[in-house]
Image (cartoon, helix red, strand yellow):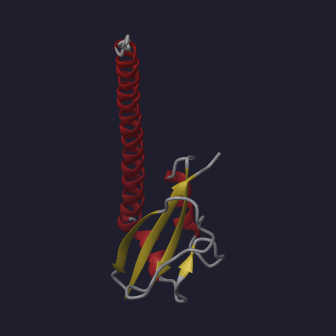
Amino acid sequence: MIIKKKNKKAWIKIAEAFISILLIIGVLMAVLVYQNVNKKNDLNEKINSQEISILNNIQTNKSLREDILGITSLPLDSNETLFPTLVKEELNNTILGELICKFAICPIEGECSVMGLPDDQEIFVKSVVISSSLEEYAPRKLNLFCYQNEV
């Protein structure tokens, strides 16, 4: 009886090549995911710093603070006609075109939201307290809601 030995070296080479290709693809995918995460973190930091800048400008500007403190019907968001025009203009002058931002002015203890925010996007929210002027004490919470403009 003649027994033939099968040559398994070719199959081993094919398996080694396949595993090598999978490893290379895995490394490339990991690098691409890492780059996307870094880009997203950079965008988040940029939006965060811009929101803080806008809110600090409003906090330190006497006329803008007085406009906010003079509002009697709360809550109020920037979509409504009673919202202070100077505060809207400050937002429009400082915000970049890649973001859409809206304000809400609320009592300190209440919830604060804005109508018309998209459900399918990440919303960045920052808030500050506008507490008083020399004439009156009527604390308000000013929230800034921003999301990326999808062009």
Looking at the figure, which quarter contains the N terminus? top left
Q: Classify residue 110 as left or right of residue 84.
A: left
Q: Residue furthest front?
A: 1
Front position in the image: 100 or 66: 100
Q: Quadrant of residue 92?
A: bottom right
From what the image shows, is residue 19 above or below residue 136? above
Residue 55 location, x and y as percent?
40, 63
Who's the residue at 36% across and 62% down the image? Answer: 56
Who's the residue at 59% across and 68% down the image? Answer: 85
Residue 44 location, x and y as percent?
40, 51
Who's the residue at 52% across and 66% down the image? Answer: 87
From what the image shows, is residue 97 above or below residue 124? above
Front position in the image: 66 or 24: 24
Who's the residue at 58% across and 61% down the image? Answer: 120
Residue 69 location, x and y as percent?
44, 81
Front position in the image: 147 or 25: 25
Asked if one can make out residue 136 in the rendered structure from this viewpoint, the answer is: no
Residue 65 location, x and y as percent?
42, 73
Badge count:
0
Asked if one can make out residue 76 in the rendered structure from this viewpoint, the answer is: yes
From what the image shows, is residue 78 above or below residue 56? below
Looking at the figure, which quarter contains the C terminus? top right
